[in-house]
Amino acid sequence: MKKQIFLLVVIAAVFALMVGCSREKKAESQMKTEQHVAKKLNVTVDMLTTDKDLSCGVTLTNETIADTAIYKGQLYGFCSEDCKAKFKANPDSVIANFQMQHQ
């Protein structure tokens, strides 16, 4: 009986370590991707019209700028391709909504 309990504890510990390592690797991979994207774009927050993603309102940093778009001579930054796509579908509406929410 003690051997069975010990074996169950060991199996549970190994499983917990595997799950934890998987999450850490995924987070590390995502962070490296975000850093790579920001470096590849060679864009910094001070180059943008606003330091916020107009589509979702998240505050951008140099490391989290995933994409950009130029609209009416202004450079806008986005945290994801999805937010950029939402902006590009109707930029005037997104800008108006952002301005209403952040006044």
Image: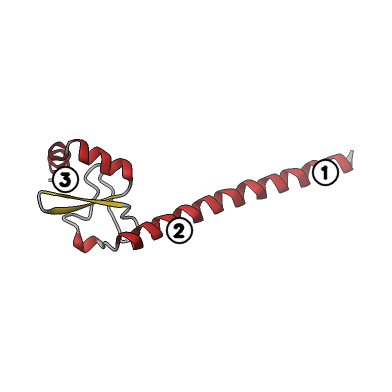
Residue on which the image places disc 2: 32
Question: Is disc 2 surrounded by few (<14), some (14 to 19) or many (20+) residues within 10 Å?
Answer: few
Determine which of the numbered discs, if any, sits on residue 7 in the image: 1
**Cα distance between the residues tagged 2 and 1:** 37 Å
- Left or right of residue 81, residue 94 in this image: left
In the image, which disc is placed on residue 64?
none
Find residue 102 and name its label.
3
Q: Amino acid at mark 2?
A: Lys
Look at label 1 and name its amino acid.
Leu
**Is 67 in front, or is 24?**
67
Examine the image and state in which quarter residue 37 appears: bottom left
Q: CA distance from mark 2 to mark 3?
A: 31 Å
**Residue in the image at 24% along x and 60% along y:** 45
Label 2 secondary element = helix
Q: In this image, 30 relative to 63: left or right?
A: right
**Badge 3 or badge 1: first in the primary sequence:** 1
Residue under the image location 40 percent in, 60 percent down: 36
Q: In terms of depth relative to the viewer, which is nearer, 98 or 35?
A: 35
Question: In the depicted view, which residue is nearer to us: 3 or 42?
Answer: 42
Q: Residue at x 50, y 56 (%)?
A: 28
Instruction: Identify which residue is drawn at 72% across, 43% down.
Output: 12
Residue 95 image offset from top left, x and y in percent: 14, 42
**Please, what secondary structure does the residue beneath circle 1 have?**
helix
Disc 2 or 1, which lies upstream in sequence? 1
The percent position of residue 72, horizontal first and vertical second, equals 10, 49
